Amino acid sequence: MGEFELRIALAVLVCLVLPISLTFWWVRRRERREDRKHYEALAALTASIGGVVIGRDEATAWSTGLRPPFKTHVGGLINWMGTVRKPRFETALDFRRDGWQVRVSEASMRRAVSNGTSTFYEHRIDVATAPLPPMKLHRRLHTDFRGRPVKPDSILALGGKPVREAPVTVAQQQGQWLEVNLPLSVSTDWVAFSSAPQGAPLTPEALEWLSRNTGALPWGLTFESGLLYATWPTRIQPQTLLTTVDAMLGLLDRIPGARRG
């Protein structure tokens, strides 16, 4: 290859590589700026309620042994091929709220997408409780993502598949996992499953709280191994976090024996 052809080849290479490098640099710079703003908002919120922010080394969710982060995105060949960076916990908030010990943790992973890679986030609220019978609560879905009504007998209208999947502790013991008979005023919006349907810790006051606070509570709640926890496929939302936490604690306040001694 002559000198002229070599220069042309180098020029073409630069034209190809430079835009990609600049794009990568800009994306990483934007992500760092967003991470900094997010951390500052979390730190301000946690300080306002007397809590602490925990770094990556100790940010693991209390319930991670019961449900690992990004459970539906790990395992299997397709998920393995699409994973650029495995899930890891990035930060957590520890605080006491109305006498309850709470941890809110945030995890991330990087996955391949059509135009490169992208970071996905998940956060979880864990509340320490006394041992209670394992139970899941999940909101029913009345419309799809386009706002169209779903069929009354569809799996979404019936609470979805997650609520029908026994928690790990029940599955390990091969225990029963049956639907809880909820009153009509609650079953319109909620479905519940438990290992002890007749002894599920849902008092009339708790059921009324569920009915009145459907919009503030998470889509899914799990009682298991001395914890009440819920997971979202987003980063921690500082603006609405305490509203959600207070709704969960309000439910626990209406369940006798839920507080740790």
Image (cartoon, rainbow, N blue to C red):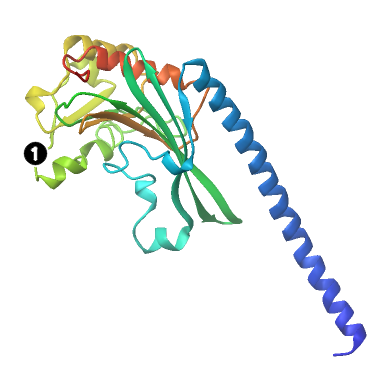
Tell me the residue at 32%/14% (across/down).
Answer: 99
Element type where label 1 sits in the image? loop
Tell me the residue at 17%/41% (across/down).
Answer: 169
Q: Quadrant of the N terminus?
A: bottom right
Q: Looking at the rendering, which quadrant does residue 220 occupy?
A: top left
Q: Quadrant of the C terminus?
A: top left
Task: Give the x, y percent position of residue 166.
Answer: 19, 40
Amino acid type at circle 1 is: Gln
Whether residue 4 is visible, yes or no, is yes
Task: Give the x, y percent position of residue 20.
Answer: 72, 60
Q: Looking at the rendering, which quadrant does residue 10 occupy?
A: bottom right
Number of numbered callouts drawn: 1
* Label 1 Cα neighbours within 10 Å, binned few <14 / some 14-19 / many ≥20: few
Task: Give the x, y percent position of residue 32.
Answer: 65, 42
> Is 150 positioned to the left or the right of 24 in the image?
left
Tell me the residue at 56%/22% (across/down).
Answer: 44
Residue 228 vertical placement versus 76 (above, below): above
Task: Give the x, y percent position of residue 200.
Answer: 13, 23
Whether residue 239 is visible, yes or no, is no
Residue sitting nearer the eye, 181 or 128? 128
Tell me the residue at 52%/24% (across/down).
Answer: 238
Q: Which residue is mark 1?
A: 176
Work out which residue is located at the far bottom of the displayed protein and give it: 1
Residue 255 vertical placement versus 24 (above, below): above
